[in-house]
Image (cartoon, helix red, strand yellow):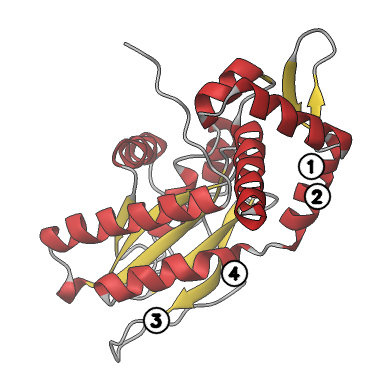
């Protein structure tokens, strides 16, 4: 019986810490009770135990609670040891399992305003496109870059446009600003980028953005398939699959979508 009670306490502590971590700021005991569906006496007791260890802090001017310095320290240590590739692999394998197309992980490099491939999970098809890992390339061309570019702040979009990168597939000059901004708006609206032959001739790329706990875009999950295997029905199926897995990966990285405003 004591083991079951201890397990229950551990589960409640984990839920309480998660609730504090996911909140936008200090929260009241009433909020915690309602969210966790626990009596006030239990929440008071758990907060007291956690406060003793520096895991939670009480606001000076009101009885609200927030993550403590010790919890922040531990979380920072863990975050520094977690590689996005290790977190992404299960979701990428799920993409390949569901559609048998190669899935690639791209990371945004903000200092250069470029993306680079970190990892790929390959399909069973004998024809595979060559992937240059850890080689930064333009945000302007291909679903790999535009899936990121569309969700950057406008200043970063403008800076990327000023790079004037040419198409790696055809050598074409960068798209006109008006046309590119319209495409980025469409990407934001539907949630994914799709390009035809922009980086590899005869290939179609589909990419979906990945976000972190600060709601910043940090990369993309992408599929590249031969034009001969591509159809509009394939676009609907692959884009839905990719967005779902990219969303799951984002949540695994701590992303919480912005609450929708009430109408």
Q: CA distance from mark 2 to mark 4?
A: 19 Å
Q: Position of residue 87 (x, y in %)?
A: 56, 64
Q: Is residue 110 left or right of residue 140?
A: right
For label 2, the SS is helix
Q: Nearer the viewer, residue 112 or 77?
A: 77
Other-residue count near label 2 (Cα within 10 Å), few / some / many at <14 / 14–19 / ≥20: few
Q: CA distance from mark 4 to mark 1?
A: 23 Å
Residue of label 4:
86
Mark 4 or mark 1, which has the lower sequence index? 1
Q: Is residue 81 left or right of residue 165?
A: right
**Do callouts 2 and 1 mark residues in contact (Cβ within 8 Å)?**
yes
Q: Nearer the viewer, mark 4 or mark 1?
A: 1
Q: Residue furthest bottom?
A: 126
Q: Quadrant of the N terminus?
A: bottom right
Q: Residue at x 17, y 74 (%)?
A: 229
Residue of label 3:
122
Residue 221 sits above or below residue 121 on the image = above
Q: Is residue 202 visible?
A: no
Residue of label 2:
74
Residue of label 1:
71
Q: Position of residue 53 (x, y in %)?
A: 87, 40
Q: Nearer the viewer, mark 1 or mark 3?
A: 1
């Amino acid at each position: 019986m004591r083991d079951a009670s201890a397990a229950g306490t551990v589960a409640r502590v984990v839920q309480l810490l998660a609730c504090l971590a996911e909140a936008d700021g200090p929260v009241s005991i009433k909020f915690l009770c309602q969210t966790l569906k626990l009596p006030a006496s239990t929440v008071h007791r758990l907060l007291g135990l956690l406060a003793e260890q520096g895991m939670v802090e009480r606001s000076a001017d009101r009885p609200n609670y927030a993550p403590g310095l010790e919890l922040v320290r531990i979380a920072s240590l863990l975050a520094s040891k977690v590689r996005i590739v290790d977190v992404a692999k299960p979701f990428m394998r799920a993409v390949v399992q569901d559609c048998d197309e190669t899935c690639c992980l791209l990371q945004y490099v903000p200092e250069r305003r470029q993306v680079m491939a970190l990892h790929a999970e390959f399909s069973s098809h004998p024809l595979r496109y060559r992937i240059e890992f850890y080689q930064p390339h333009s945000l302007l061309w291909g679903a790999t870059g535009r899936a990121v570019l569309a969700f950057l702040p406008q200043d970063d979009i403008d800076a990327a446009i000023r790079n004037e990168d040419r198409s790696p597939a055809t050598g074409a000059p960068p798209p006109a600003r008006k046309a590119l901004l319209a495409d980025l708006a469409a990407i934001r609206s539907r949630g994914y980028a799709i390009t035809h032959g922009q980086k590899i001739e005869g290939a179609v790329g589909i990419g979906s953005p990945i976000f972190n706990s600060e709601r910043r875009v940090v990369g993309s999950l992408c599929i590249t398939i031969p034009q001969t295997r591509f159809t509009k029905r394939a676009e609907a199926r692959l884009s839905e699959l990719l967005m779902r897995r990219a969303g799951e990966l984002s949540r695994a990285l701590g992303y919480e979508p912005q609450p929708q405003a009430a109408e």
